[in-house]
Image: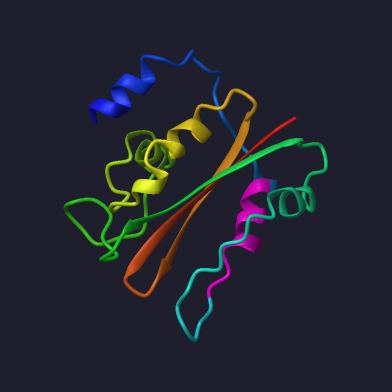
Amino acid sequence: MNDAIAYLDTVKPLGALHYSEAIYKAIGDHTGIDTVTGIVKHDRKLFSRISKYDKSFHAFGENFALVSKTGQIGAKKKTTEMSMKEALTLFVVDITMYHQKRFRGGHRKAFFNPRYKFTAIKLVKVKYQVYLFQEFAGK
């Protein structure tokens, strides 16, 4: 948590990120699930996927993380429902990223990139694991 606070002290305030239906559809193309193995297919073809739905974007980024090993989001009940605010907070704070040390801090850097003005998120449940996908774009 302290590293998140220290990082937030170094960034300039940004305008709001706006939801994009085009980006949400592109995430759907991105998050295919192999029904035999249960593996989430994760490609990095942001430009081609997002441009398929909106050709006006020119800057692209993503966050992808395992947010639950048990299928439980939150402490009180088992659900894959989460508000956008809660999901995005996970990327800023990096609390529930389950020891994905190579990404530590990288999620928040994408989130605070001033080139990105549009975003969408999607939770994908695979067996008992929940993955969070977030993609960004700027015009």
From the image, which quarter does the N terminus lie in?
top left
Who is closer to the viewer here, 27 or 96?
96
Residue 69 point in image, percent of width and height: 28, 64
Q: Is residue 8 left or right of residue 44?
A: left
Instruction: Give the residue at the far bottom of this rendering.
Output: 36
From the image, which quarter does the C terminus lie in?
top right
129 inside magenta stretch: no
Q: Is residue 31 left or right of residue 11?
A: right
- Secondary structure mostly seen in magenta is helix
Image colouring: rainbow
Residue 53 point in image, percent of width and height: 77, 50
Residue that appears at 28% across and 48% down = 96
Answer above or below: position of 20 versus 138. Answer: below
The magenta-colored residue range is 23-33
Residue that appears at 53% across and 78% down = 34
Residue that appears at 23% across and 26% down = 2
Residue 22 point in image, percent of width and height: 70, 47
Asked which quadrant contains residue 66, the reply is bottom left
Answer above or below: position of 120 versus 18. Answer: below
Residue 77 point in image, percent of width and height: 20, 58
Residue that appears at 56% across and 19% down = 15
Q: How many marks?
A: 0
Instruction: Give the residue at the far front of this rendering.
Output: 102
